[in-house]
Image (tube, rainbow, N blue to C red):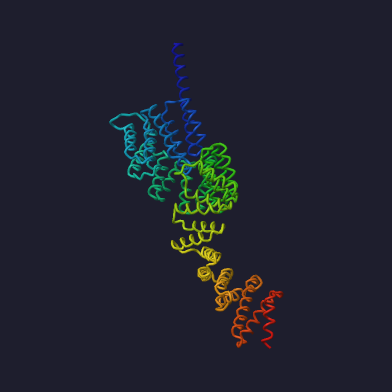
């Protein structure tokens, strides 16, 4: 009897110990899933690895480990490779199938990978296999309602995450899941996501997220989703309230801090936005994709000095991220560190495959060459950037400016002519185009362009001044007085601030004085011409009393006018 009691006692102890271990493993898995949802992917990765070391036959662990890779991609699609993440996820899902072939959940994961690759046929095969492993009246498979519902939810979510618009299948899976376990909040999260991301139905989406809140008032994810909906509706205060509630519920829920950062940035509260992003980064410690997101944010905030610091720190840890070399060059340019920026962009271009080089890379290279006074090269590079996207017509203005800087006026004129033939040149183009003609002494075309400019800018004094000088060069003796009407306009438009424009007024007065003097010399019988010249000469001397030429004309005119 004593032996029997001992045997049952040992058995009971074994059962308790087994239950304890399974409970601990279940808790660890829940913690790992929570880390994934909080976008703490590296920490989740370590915990999944630890769990698998202790229990390598649990298919659920492989699924959520694989899902961690997919969620890493979705958290930062710009800087994370879909190919790499789906490959890692697929490997995990495949191992899950091998270790626990009767668990349908990893087939749902494989279906999502196939859908992301747009392989619908393969995805359907995996989903059919997953469905065949669920209990029915015929197959007599034993499975808890919770696990049954969870598998259906993951099958539906595969379509939602891949943006595959098979909503009939999605909602069928979710209805079945709801029958099995109506308390599963993921049913309503996925249904809400399907409504907003696939059907653009915010009303139905928020109804489902509200169900999540009613089932679990402490769901940070529900608050995040509702906040994102209000952001889409541009109801920023409502969004702010939900994001803040999300971090109040769970201060380690990283995505809410990121969304708060974006919201505060939109509101122009830049320092607060950076604080939220830093908190997001802190929670994602060691997570390079999270740091890349922060760098992108700093670039959007135009905080280039801090972006450069962050970029350098990440490159110190990982030199393989090509996009960081690009971002560093861009940030150095925007921060006016042109010499270092040129080295950075050239380093980036050297290490980047040709098919990965963007138009913007070539554009920044051209700009950095120009800022380093290498304008003969800059003009060619900038033109190449324009040729990659000829709709970006304003790049031609940058090409022309580079030609101007090293005084290649013929090519300047060629580029402005090209731009004007595609889309009317802007006023600054016309001004610089006119000056290019002036500099090669093509005064006829220069006069046409300065007139065109002045018609569009009727109060810009410098434009009229250059126009008048151009006309003077076409009529240097003032026989025809070509410049006279323009100098008269200069005197008129500068009346409101004669001090500011005293040089332009002096030039105009002198021209008028000389014009009337010259006309008098040609026609000495018309003393009114002499009187007009005398008047303008006095205006010259009022501004410049030591003007010798004006004095000489005055002395000559005194003998005529009594």
Looking at the picture, tell me which residue is in the foreground, 17 or 69.
69
* 196 relative to 156, above or below: below
- Using residue 359 as the reference point, say whether residue 120 is left or right of it: left
Looking at the picture, tell me which residue is in the foreground, 22 or 54.
54
**Number of disc labels:** 0
**Residue 64, image x, y percentages:** 44, 34
* 102 relative to 165, above or below: above
For the point 63% across and 84% down, the residue is 530
Locate the C terminus by quadrant: bottom right
- Would you identify the image quadrant in which residue 489 lies? bottom right
* 189 relative to 484, above or below: above
**Residue 20, image x, y percentages:** 48, 25
Looking at the picture, tell me which residue is in the foreground, 8 or 260.
260
The single residue placed furthest to the right in the displayed view is: 546
**Residue 443, image x, y percentages:** 53, 69
Residue 275 showing in the rendered view: no
- Using residue 482 as the reference point, say whether residue 212 is left or right of it: left
Locate the N terminus by quadrant: top left
């Amino acid at each position: 009897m004593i032996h029997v009691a001992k045997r049952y006692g040992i058995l009971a102890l074994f059962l308790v110990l087994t239950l304890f271990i399974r409970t601990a493993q279940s808790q660890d898995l829940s913690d790992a899933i929570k880390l994934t949802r909080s976008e703490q992917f590296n920490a989740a990765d370590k915990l999944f690895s630890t769990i698998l070391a202790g229990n390598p036959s649990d298919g659920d662990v492989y699924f959520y480990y694989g899902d961690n890779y997919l969620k890493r991609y979705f958290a930062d699609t710009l800087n994370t490779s879909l190919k790499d993440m789906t490959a890692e996820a697929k490997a995990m899902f495949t191992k899950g199938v091998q270790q626990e072939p009767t668990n349908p959940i990893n087939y749902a994961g494989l279906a999502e990978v196939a859908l992301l690759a747009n392989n619908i046929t393969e995805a359907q095969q995996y989903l059919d296999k997953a469905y065949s492993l669920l209990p029915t009246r015929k197959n007599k498979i034993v499975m808890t309602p919770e696990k049954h519902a969870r598998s259906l939810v993951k099958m539906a979510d595969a379509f939602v995450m891949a943006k595959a618009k098979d909503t009939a299948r999605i909602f069928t899976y979710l209805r079945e899941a709801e029958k099995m376990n109506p308390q599963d909040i993921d049913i309503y999260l996925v249904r809400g996501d399907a409504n907003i991301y696939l059907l653009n139905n915010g009303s139905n989406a928020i109804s489902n997220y509200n169900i999540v809140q009613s089932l679990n008032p402490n769901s940070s994810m529900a608050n995040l989703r509702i906040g994102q909906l209000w952001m889409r509706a541009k109801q920023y205060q409502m969004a702010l309230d939900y994001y803040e509630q999300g971090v109040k519920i769970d201060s380690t829920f990283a995505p809410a801090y990121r969304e708060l950062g974006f919201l505060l940035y939109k509101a122009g509260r830049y320092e607060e936005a950076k604080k939220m992003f830093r908190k997001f980064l802190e929670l994602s410690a060691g997570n390079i994709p999270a740091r890349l997101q922060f760098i992108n944010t700093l670039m959007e905030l135009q905080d280039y000095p801090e972006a450069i610091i962050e970029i350098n720190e990440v490159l110190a840890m990982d030199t393989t991220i090509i996009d960081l070399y690009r971002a560093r060059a861009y940030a150095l340019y925007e921060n006016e560190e042109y010499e270092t920026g040129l080295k950075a962009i050239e380093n980036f271009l050297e290490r980047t495959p040709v098919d990965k080089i963007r138009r913007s890379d070539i554009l920044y290279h051209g700009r950095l060459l120009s800022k380093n006074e290498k304008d003969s090269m800059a003009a060619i590079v900038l033109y190449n950037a324009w040729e990659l996207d000829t709709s970006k017509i304003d790049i031609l203005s940058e090409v022309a400016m580079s030609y101007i800087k090293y005084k290649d006026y013929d090519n300047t004129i060629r580029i402005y002519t090209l731009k004007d033939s595609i889309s009317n040149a802007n006023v600054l183009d016309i001004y610089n185009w006119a000056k290019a003609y002036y500099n090669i002494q093509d005064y006829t075309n220069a006069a046409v362009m300065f007139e065109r400019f002045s018609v569009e800018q009727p109060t810009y004094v410098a434009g009229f001044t250059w126009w008048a000088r151009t006309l003077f060069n076409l009529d240097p003796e003032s026989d025809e007085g070509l410049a006279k009407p323009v100098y008269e306009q200069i005197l008129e438009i500068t009346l409101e601030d004669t001090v500011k424009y005293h040089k332009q007024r002096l030039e105009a007065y002198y021209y008028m004085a000389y014009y009337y003097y010259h006309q008098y010399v040609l026609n000495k019988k018309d003393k009114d011409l002499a009187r007009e010249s005398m008047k303008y000469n006095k205006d010259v001397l009022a501004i410049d009393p030591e003007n010798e030429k004006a004095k000489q004309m005055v002395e000559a005119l005194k003998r005529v006018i009594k």
